[in-house]
Image (cartoon, grey):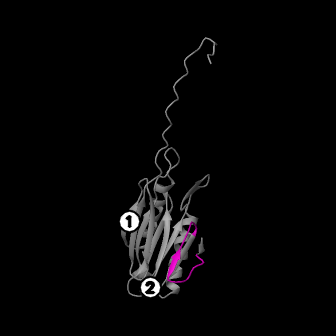
Amino acid sequence: MKRAAGRGPNINITQGEYAVSDHVGGVITTILGSCIATCIWDPVRNVGGMNHILVARSHTSMGVNDFAGVNAMELLINGLVRLGADRTRLNAKVFGGARMISGLSDIGNTNGAFITEFLEKEGIPCLGKSLGGTSARQIKFFPAEGRVMQRTVAGAPEVVAPPKAPERATRNDVELF
């Protein structure tokens, strides 16, 4: 997880990035599929941030591994604290976790379960969430206000096989001209 390069009022983050801001009127944006984004803000200090987590929890031969998700959340929370947020006043909204391709593992559901468990354990109230489904999401977070706009993006239409060409009638090997 790395901090996004942009630091101005409008920041776009991609997989594995996070951003924090105290710009009034600023916005942090991302697009999600099975990934999850957590928008966290301090309503008194008017600072907020968002992360974009690709895989929060993995299953290995040693058991469940939450290191990537915990790291992503701690980087976001610590970034907010550096801007003056008080950890006891933080609120959250979470998005993503869609099942984008049927027939494959449901990593989106695993990501959603991780984030809701993390927020509960840390005592951070989750004031809104949009998890699961089969559609991608575009997220716009206004960090100074804690306001989020979500637009779902319909999946690509199923490819319909073209109709079969009619079979040619069998001929008697005589061609007329």
Residue 88: x and y, percent?
41, 81
- Viewport quadrant of the N terminus: bottom right
Q: Which of 108 and 117 is in front in this view?
A: 108
Residue at the image point whose x is 39% and y is 72% from the top: 148
- Viewport quadrant of the C terminus: top right
Name the residue that disc number 1 marks: 129
Q: How many labels were placed on the picture?
A: 2
Callout 2: helix, strand or loop?
loop
Q: In this view, which residue lies farthest toward the left?
A: 127
- Note whether 59 is above or below 87 in the view shown: above
Kindly identify the amino acid type of the residue bearing the numbered disc 2: Asp
**Magenta segment, which residues?**
4-16
Question: From mark 1 to mark 2, how far is it between C-alphas?
Answer: 22 Å
Give the left or right position of residue 6, taking residue 148 as reference.
Answer: right
Residue 156: x and y, percent?
48, 51
Q: How dense is the environment of label 2, judged by Cα within 10 Å: few (below 14), some, or many (20 and up)?
A: some
Residue 8 magenta-highlighted: yes
Kindly identify the amino acid type of the residue bearing the numbered disc 1: Lys
Residue at the image point whose x is 55% and y is 60% from the top: 55
Of mark 1 and mark 2, the one earlier in the sequence is: 2
Q: How dense is the environment of label 1, judged by Cα within 10 Å: few (below 14), some, or many (20 and up)?
A: some
Residue 87 magenta-highlighted: no
Task: Point out which mark residue 85 bears.
Answer: none
Task: Point out which mark residue 86 bears.
Answer: 2
Residue 51: x and y, percent?
51, 71
Residue 75: x and y, percent?
55, 76
- Note whether 81 is above or below 165 in the view shown: below
Q: Can you tell which of label 1 and label 2 is closer to the viewer?
A: 1
The secondary structure that most of the magenta stretch takes on is loop
